[in-house]
Image (cartoon, grey):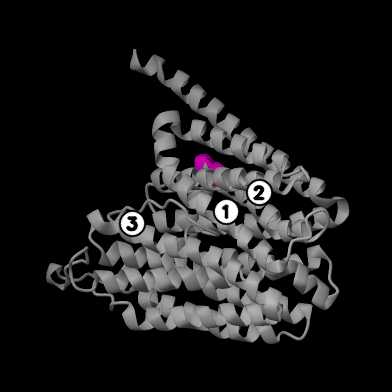
Amino acid sequence: MPPASTGASTIVVDASAPQSPVTTTAAPAAATHERLEPGRPGYRRMSFALFAAGVAAFALLYSTQALLPAVSASFDATAGQASWTVSAATGALALFVLPLSALSERFGRRQMMTASLAIAVLVGLLVPLAPSMGALIALRAVQGAALAGLPASAMAYLAEEVRPKALIAAIGLFVAGNSIGGMSGRILTGWVAQAWGWRAALAAVGLLALACAVAFHFLIPKARNFRPGSLNPKALAKTVATHLADPLLVRLYAIGALFMTVFGAVYTVIGYRLVEEPFSLPQGVIGSIFLVYLVGTVSSAAAGRLVARLGRRGALYLAVSTTAAGLLLSLADQLAAVLLGLVLITAGFFAGHAVASSSVSRTATTGRAQASALYQSAYYLGSSAGGTLGAVAFHAGGWTATVALGLLAVLGVVSITLYGTRVARAERRALVPATR
């Protein structure tokens, strides 16, 4: 999972940079094994294994999102109450991603990924049996906490086991698994729920994730370049405090959280809107709406070119403008306009997320793993907040209120970006006398 990924994202990894504050045991140079690359034994197995892990993780993480209207009807719950089945999972992931990424430094990337998937899948097979809304939310929180062990461990595993020139391609395949898992899980649940109900839909996702976890277990090569270290909580706390004291990093974390607030609100509530008049769409068709995620895969991949042409802030301005236009267009009562609005929202969100997440890696000069983990925490907290607040807004004032919440978050991104632009200009002016 990317620094997130409810879908595709751009991740920049510098394998030579310090990745975590641990004390490692020195090893002779001979202990370093040859790294994986295309054409060498193990690379293809590793690629398929992490692709399967990405599919399983994101299919599980957002498994209830397309089913919220059915869950609400089953438990006689409001949209706000049902939204917690998504927010509890993403919120728990946000809280546990940093500590579990640190534990992987001690116990191993492969072991952490295997344990995370195993626990998440086991809980996923229990979720359809939840007797009440409270039990369902609790199980989903446990599931999200378990999945937190996967993203940072996967990135660290790739950085250690894959040759640098093949690293971006390997990460891209893992991110593709995230995107396809998030999309296919929602589509699968929509159509299965239409035929057999939401419990059967969640069971289907659990079985899909089980198959992917089994494939991961048998395909993933053993880590040959991992060196366990002793955890140093003080060093970890110091690194985190240093990142949180960096104004630019804090702005990037806030931008990621605000973008995800919009996205979480829209995709948590859209099912409620489309099941009602004037649309009255069946559950299967609503699930298929998530095919729009493919637009995000394209826009996130194009983010690098946008930054090269417009600069980081220019790309962010374009992303927020696209997102805002989509929100406004979605207010129409014509299905074509709503779908086009979702396309624009999705394209703008993924582009903005890609710019912000890759900027974190460029900005942090030390402790890049912790800097990225903090971004993921902010990102998923934004998802949790957006899902819950969007549903509450919808219950209080309909889709218009949800769009107003999204526009408020977009305004926050614009304000932060404008402030960053002013700070950068002031810094450049301050440097002019020194260069004369």
In percent of width and height, residue 342 lies at 64, 48
Numbered disc 1: secondary structure:
helix
In percent of width and height, residue 153 lies at 41, 68
Numbered disc 2: secondary structure:
helix
Numbered disc 3: secondary structure:
loop
Q: Nearer the viewer, residue 114 or 434?
A: 114
Estimate the spatial distance between the alpha carbons at disc 3 and disc 1, rounded to whole Å. 37 Å
The correct choice, above or below, for 358 with respect to 70 in the image is: above
Can you tell which quarter of the image residue 288 is in?
bottom right
For the residue marked with disc 1, what is the amino acid?
Answer: Val
For the residue marked with disc 3, what is the amino acid?
Answer: Pro
Q: Which residue is mark 2?
A: 339
Q: Earlier in the sequence, mark 3 or mark 1?
A: 3
The correct choice, above or below, for 62 with respect to 216 in the image is: above
The label shown at residue 292 is: 1
Q: Nearer the viewer, residue 424 or 376?
A: 376
The correct choice, above or below, for 64 with respect to 399 in the image is: below
Q: Which residues are magenta?
A: 247-252
For the residue marked with disc 2, what is the amino acid?
Answer: Leu
Q: Earlier in the sequence, mark 3 or mark 2?
A: 3
In percent of width and height, residue 217 lies at 38, 82
Q: Are marks 3 and 2 in contact (CB under 8 Å)?
A: no
Q: Are marks 1 and 2 in contact (CB under 8 Å)?
A: yes
Q: Nearer the viewer, residue 421 or 234?
A: 421
Q: Is residue 140 left or right of residue 102?
A: right
